Image (cartoon, helix red, strand yellow):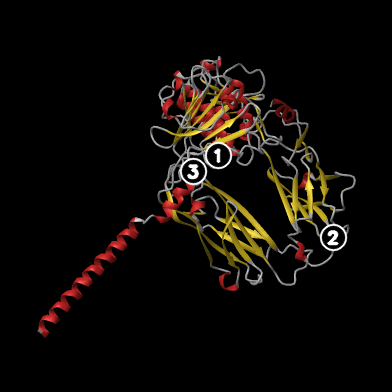
Amino acid sequence: MIGGLASVAAGADVQIHPFYSDKPIHSEGGRWTYFFQLPHGLFLAGDGSFSIDYDTSPTLSATDESITVLLNGQPVDSRSVVVANPTPAHWQIKLPMKYCKGGFNEVSLIIRSLSRLGPCSEDDDMKNWVRFLKSSVIHLDLAEPGAFPINAYPFPYLNWLSQPITTVPIAVGPTAKDGSISAALNIAAGWGHRITDQPLILKMTRSAVTTSAVHIGLPSELGGPLRASEIEAQGSDLWITGPDRAVLAACVKSLNNPEIATQMSGFAASPMDFLPKPPDGAPRLGATTFDELGYPSIKLSGVGSQGTAIVLRRPLLVKIGRGGLLRLRFRHAATLVKTHSMLSVAINGQQIGSAQLTPENANDGDLICPLPINLADSNQWNIEISAHNELANVDCSKTYADIAWTTILGMSAFELQDGTLPNLPFLEGFPYFRASDGTLPQALSVNVGIRPSTEVLSCAATTVARAAQTNRGMTTWNATSGDVTGYEDLVIGLFRQEDRFKAVLSNLLVAPSKSGIPVVNQGLPILPSSLVGACVIQAVHKKSGGVAYVILGASSAAIQRFTEYLGNPEVGGMLKGEVAVFTKEGEIFTFDTMSEAERRAAESAEMRRYKPEMILSMTSVIVLLTALAGFLGSKFIKRKKVKQ
C-alpha cells in the first residue's frame, strides 16, 4: 500500500490502469471516458502516454473502423482498426503536456465500427466490438514535487493516481481514546466521500508507524509535544493534533471540506468553523424529485440508442404498498423522426414504460410509469433510462450529438406509497443508513471493542469510507468501546465474544458464543462448516429504531479478508438479504428470514388490500345509497297511501 505513494513522492513515472477488467465497447459510435485528477502541488515534467492493448471482433471490416483518442476534448491520435492479429494489438499514444491541466483531466476513446459497408442501421449490432484490456496503462511524467502543501489534501495520503488507489495508514496512538478513534474514522469517511466511484481498502492502526502515515490524536497519545499548528504536513506524514476531542473534530471537519482545504496554503493550518452543505436526498414515501436525488438533468445525446442508469435504495424499515410510480419529465430535439424515436424505462431489468418522441412533446414530455408490486417490493432499484434518437438522412461519419438528444429534467420524480409490504433490514448497498424520510442521520456510532486490533480498526475505517460512498453523503461517526448496547449503527467483533454482545444476543440472526462456534437463529440454513474461518455480515433491527450492521469474524484474519473483499470492484456489490456469510475460501452465501413464497403472499395481500381512502369512499357511497333508498322507499309508501 505504501509503494504507490513512494513512487509519487519521488516524482517518477506514474502508471494508471484505467480498466479494472477487460472493457468491451459495442456498436457504431461507442465512447469510453476516464477522468484523472492532478492535485495541487503536482505538475507534469513532460508529455505523458497511453499504452492501449485491445482485441477485436473477427467480423470487423478493414476500411470503416477507427479509434480516436481525445485529451480534454483535443484529438491526439487516431487509427484504423483491423482485426487484431496477433492478439492483442498494441497502440502507443502520446498525451501532450500542453493539453493537460490542473484538476480533472478527461481521456476519451471514440469507436467507429461497422461489420460491412452500408447505412447506419447496424449501430446496435452486438457482433461489432473492440475490447480494451486491463493491461492498458496511462503514463504520466511528474515533476519533482518536493513536499506537498496541505492544500493538496487528501493527496498524497490518498493517491488516486495509482490504480488501484493506494492509501497510507491512519495511525492513532496505542493509548488512543474514543475521541481520537472517532476523528480517525471521520478522516476515512472523508476519503470515501472524495472518491465516490472507486473502492477503497484502508488501514488503520494503534501501532507505531515508521513509514508515511496520517497521525491523529492528542499529543499524549501520539507520544509528542503539542505542535505549533493543529494540522501540519511534515515530509510524507500528516499530523492532526489538538488539546481535546473538539479540536480534533474541527480539524477533520475542515480537511473534509474541499473548499476549505484548498485554501490552506503552506504546510501548517488551523481548523475553522462552518456550516456544511447538506447531502443529496434519497427516495422516501411520497414523491422525490431527481433534483433532490442529485440529478438536475440527464442528457442522452447522439444518434441511435443512448442510455443511463440510476441506483436507488429502499428507505429503511418503511412499509411500501402499491400505487408507486416513476414520472419522467423530458425534452428532446424536435428534429427527431417520431416513427423511430422512443424513450423507454426499465427497473431491475423489467420494462415498465415507454413513450414516442414526437414534435408535440419536444418541450414538455411526460412519461408516467406505474411501479409493479413486485418491483415496489425491492430493496434496491436499478433504473435504466434509454432514448433512441433517430434522424432522417444520417451521415454515418457524424455523431449529431448537438441535434439528436433527449434530456431528462430534474423535476422528474420517483414516488412511493405506504402499504403493508414487509420492511426487513437488508444488506444491499452495505452499509446503508438513509432514514425513512430519505435523509442521513447527523451522527452514527461504531463499536470496535476494547483495545481493537489493526484488523478491526481497518475494517471499521474501510466500512465507514464505503458508507460515505453508498449513501452519497457524509455524517459524523462516533467510536465506542466496551460492551455492545444495541444502540450502535455498526459493530465489529469476533465469534467468541459472547459476553461483549450479551445485551443483543437475542436480536442477532447469527450470534457469537464462548465456544467460538456462532449460534444460528430463526432456522437459517447455514452449515456450521461454512462458518469455519468465515466472516458473517448481518443487518438487524436496533433498539432505538433503524438498522444496525454487525460484522463478526472467526478471527482477525477473517476480518481482514472481508475488508479486502469490500475493496474488490468486481464482487463488492454482492451483499444482499439479511445475512451474508463470507467464507474462508472467498465465497458468499446470502440468507433471508422471509421465504420467497412468503414474500409473494405478502405482495398478493397488498394488491387485495383496500386503502383507508378507498374504504372511506366506499363507505360514503354505501351511506349515500342507503339514504337514497330510504328516501325513495318513503315516497313510495306515501303515494300508495294517497291512492287508498
Q: Amino acid at mark 3?
A: Lys
Q: Secondary structure at mark 1?
A: loop
Tell me the quarter of the picture where residue 188 sits: top right
Tag 2 and tag 1, C-beta contact below 8 Å:
no
Q: Position of residue 558 (x, y in %)?
A: 60, 24
Query: How far apart are the alpha carbons under marks 3 and 1?
Result: 31 Å
Q: Which residue is mark 3?
A: 277
Q: Which residue is mark 2?
A: 64
**From the image, which quarter does the C terminus lie in?**
bottom left
Q: Nearer the viewer, mark 2 or mark 3?
A: 2
Residue at the extreme right: 86
Disc nearer the start of the sequence (3/1): 3
Q: Secondary structure at mark 2?
A: loop
Q: Nearer the viewer, mark 2 or mark 1?
A: 1
The disc at residue 576 is 1
Given residues 157 and 205, the one toward you in this image is 205
Disc nearer the start of the sequence (2/1): 2
Query: How far apart are the alpha carbons under marks 2 and 3?
Result: 50 Å
Given residues 17 and 286, the one toward you in this image is 286
Given residues 334 and 96, the one toward you in this image is 334
Name which residue lies at 63% across and 36% down.
199
Q: Secondary structure at mark 3?
A: loop
Tag 2 and tag 3, C-beta contact below 8 Å:
no
Q: Amino acid at mark 1?
A: Lys
The disc at residue 514 is none
